[in-house]
Amino acid sequence: MENSFDVAIIGGGIIGSSIAFQLAKRGRKVVILEKDRVACQASSAAAGMLAAQAELEEDGHLFQLALKSQAMFASLSTELVEYSGIDIELVNKGMTKIAETEEIALDIKKQVIFQRKWDPMITWLDAKEIRVLEPSLSQSVAGGMYLPNDGHVQPAKLTQAFAKAAEYFGAVIREQTEVLSFIFENGQVKGVNTTNGVIHSEQVVVASGAWSAKLLRESGLDIHVYPVKGECFSVRAEKQLINTTIFSDKRCYLVPKRNGEIYIGATMIEHSLDNKVTPEGIATLIERATQLVPQIKEAAWERVWSGIRPQTADGTPYIGEHPNWKGLFVAAGHFRNGILLSPITGVVVADLLTGKILDQNELSAFRLDRHKETVS
Ligand SMILES: Cc1cc2nc3c(=O)[nH]c(=O)nc-3n(C[C@H](O)[C@H](O)[C@H](O)COP(=O)(O)OP(=O)(O)OC[C@H]3O[C@@H](n4cnc5c(N)ncnc54)[C@H](O)[C@@H]3O)c2cc1C
């Protein structure tokens, strides 16, 4: 079995798969090492919203990165069908960010002014106008911000599509292969030890989601990635209940998927690495969702699931090279926005690994040593 590659990527989630696709397309010999299966963790649990402007409310490097990434989806979806045969189910029917009280309405109206700088089509809809767009909304809704250009995808399919497109360009995928440790020599990474033997490579990318911090500790770097579990459920209604994604606060959204399912998420349970779905979590979501769209109560039950988001102490992902070991890179900690950020993360990491000169000011927000804490 081949065991020498240009780049070894640890993790077959959406981030590792997107990076593999970009690097393989540039002619690099890439292997994805995945302890379980491609798209088995957070990347298949996500709702798939590309919600740059609903999730991020302040300008900054992360916000700008998210906007760039969001803009890549239309052409990416065509490109991925070509190389993988997989349709990522991109839906561009917009999002409505709901104000349930007059106080929240004031806050969202300020966001409309801010967000219109980047998309002049974003508007405020009052209580009457919002019900023209979304007749099933509860009578208590005070209004909302309409983001006509906000879409969503099927996240597991996007991850599979990245991985298959990477294979098309020659990448190798090793599932059921857990990386146990790094191999270092004279300040340079030389490969990794796995449950299926040694892999030699002068470049290694840690894209292991919520498990990244644990793996990196032996390299002397303490990145602040921690798990936040999210539970979801889905229903199917007889008639189309909602037209756009309904986004309330960060604890409840309803996403009408192309196959007719409505995804409803998601709880936020910090420091939980277990995947169990609890009646308490789902009951909270049902309560929140029916406050927004009462007819959800009558829809047909479909399924429940959960996933572990990789959060960071400052809410910004880590993207960059290790401060002490040449060739060791990290792309982890994309929290609630890993699906949205996957295209641009793939390009930025591929640029870094292939020596492209990048704007250091833009990248500084994502540096690995920004907390300046290392462990011995
Ligand atoms: C309920 C929920 C809803 C979400 N909704 C959205 C949304 O609407 N929009 C959005 O943009 N984002 C959303 N997210 C966030 C998004 O899912 C994540 O940010 C993204 O999937 C992270 O991708 P990843 O590749 O870093 O991690 P993961 O998908 O978790 O992949 C990491 C992979 O690394 C593997 N691994 C770990 N350690 C090792 C090792 N030692 N060796 C080999 N393999 C290893 C794991 O098995 C795993 O497959 C949501 C997340 C959840 C949980």
Image (spheres, grey):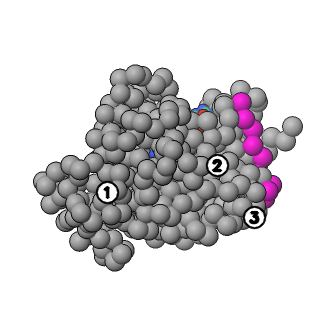
Residue at x 36% of width, y 58% of height: 134
- Horizontal and vertical percent position of residue 156: 61, 45
Drawn side of residue 59 relative to residue 255, left or right: left
Q: Position of residue 220 (x, y in %)?
A: 47, 37
Q: Is residue 107 left or right of residue 5?
A: left
Report if residue 29 is visible in the image: no
The residue beneath circle 2 is: 157
| SS for callout 3 | helix
Q: Residue at x 38, y 35 (%)?
A: 297
Q: Nearer the viewer, residue 182 or 245?
A: 245
Amino acid beneath label 2: Lys
Query: Is the CB atom of the residue marked by disc 3 within 8 angstroms of ligand 1's nearest atom?
Result: no
Between circles 3 and 1, the one closer to the viewer is 1
Find the magenta span and give its range. Answer: 168-176
Q: Is residue 253 magenta?
A: no
Residue 200 placement: quadrant: top right
Crowding at mark 2 (Cα within 10 Å: few <14, some 14-19, many 20+):
some
Indicate whether 234 appears above or below 139. above
Residue 132 or residue 22, whichever sits in front = 132
Would you say residue 172 sits in the magenta stretch?
Answer: yes
- Which numbered tag is attached to residue 82? 3
Say which residue appears at 58% left-offset and 68% top-offset.
Answer: 74
Q: Amino acid at mark 1?
A: Lys
C-alpha separation, residue under disc 3 versus residue under disc 1? 34 Å
**Disc 1 element:** strand
Dividing the picture into quadrants, the one containing residue 168 is bottom right
The disc labelled 3 sits on which kind of residue? Glu
Question: Label 1, on which residue?
Answer: 97
Mark with earlier residue (3, 1): 3
Which quarter of the rendering shows the N terminus?
top right
**Residue 164: percent from left, percent from top:** 74, 51
